[in-house]
């Protein structure tokens, strides 16, 4: 049976709380974002994200030494899966919104794409694998 090296990751929220003097909350937010001093940071282990696959390679101890294998998207981070799928959904919406007369009502043109995008979106929302 073959071996695979799999890299998994989880996001750990790191935060800081600091007071900023400003005229508005928007200005204070801008100051906070531009502040690059993280010497008083805290890690929030209780709010860490899901574990997801960030890389796969054939063979033992082979990470970054050989060509990576494609990882099915259902093993990716849910937030990233949603972001990646957004482009597909936007493309379908553009086709329907800006199609020449008759094209949008032509099921072979868009129905199969829309059904596949809907199935994948539902899989992402339920945490399931991508549809075949």
Image (cartoon, grey):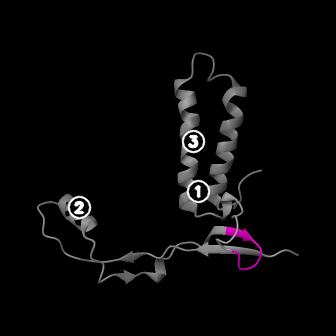
| Residue receiving disc 3 | 89
Q: Is residue 48 left or right of residue 113?
A: left
Indicate which label's residue lies in the foreground, 2 or 3: 2
Q: Is residue 61 left or right of residue 32?
A: right
Residue 30: which numbered mark, if any?
Answer: 2
**Residue 75 position within the rendered picture, expressed as x and y whole percent measured from the top left:** 66, 64
Earlier-in-chain disc, 3 versus 1: 1
Q: Secondary structure at mark 1?
A: helix
**Residue 39 position within the rendered picture, expressed as x and y whole percent measured from the top left:** 29, 83
Q: Secondary structure at mark 3?
A: helix
Which class describes the residues within 10 Å of circle 1: few (<14), some (14-19), or many (20+)?
some
**Residue 50 position within the rendered picture, expressed as x and y whole percent measured from the top left:** 57, 72
Question: Residue 114 sits in which quadrant?
Answer: top right
From the viewer's side, name the closer residue of 81 and 53: 53
Residue at 72 percent across and 35 percent down: it is: 112
State which region is magenta. Answer: 56-62
Cα separation, mark 2 vs mark 1, equals 29 Å
| Residue receiving disc 1 | 81
């Amino acid at each position: 049976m073959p071996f695979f090296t799999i890299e998994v990751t989880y996001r750990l929220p790191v935060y800081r709380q600091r007071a900023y003097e400003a005229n508005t909350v928007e200005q204070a937010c801008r100051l906070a974002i531009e502040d690059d001093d993280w010497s008083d940071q805290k890690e929030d282990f209780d709010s860490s994200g899901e574990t997801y696959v960030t890389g796969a390679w054939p063979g033992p101890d082979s990470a970054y030494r050989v060509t990576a294998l494609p990882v099915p998207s259902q093993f990716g981070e849910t937030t990233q899966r949603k972001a990646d799928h957004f482009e597909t959904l936007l493309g379908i919406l553009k086709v329907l919104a800006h199609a020449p007369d008759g094209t949008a009502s032509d099921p072979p043109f868009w129905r199969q794409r829309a059904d596949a995008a809907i199935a994948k979106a539902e899989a992402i929302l339920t945490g399931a694998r991508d549809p075949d």
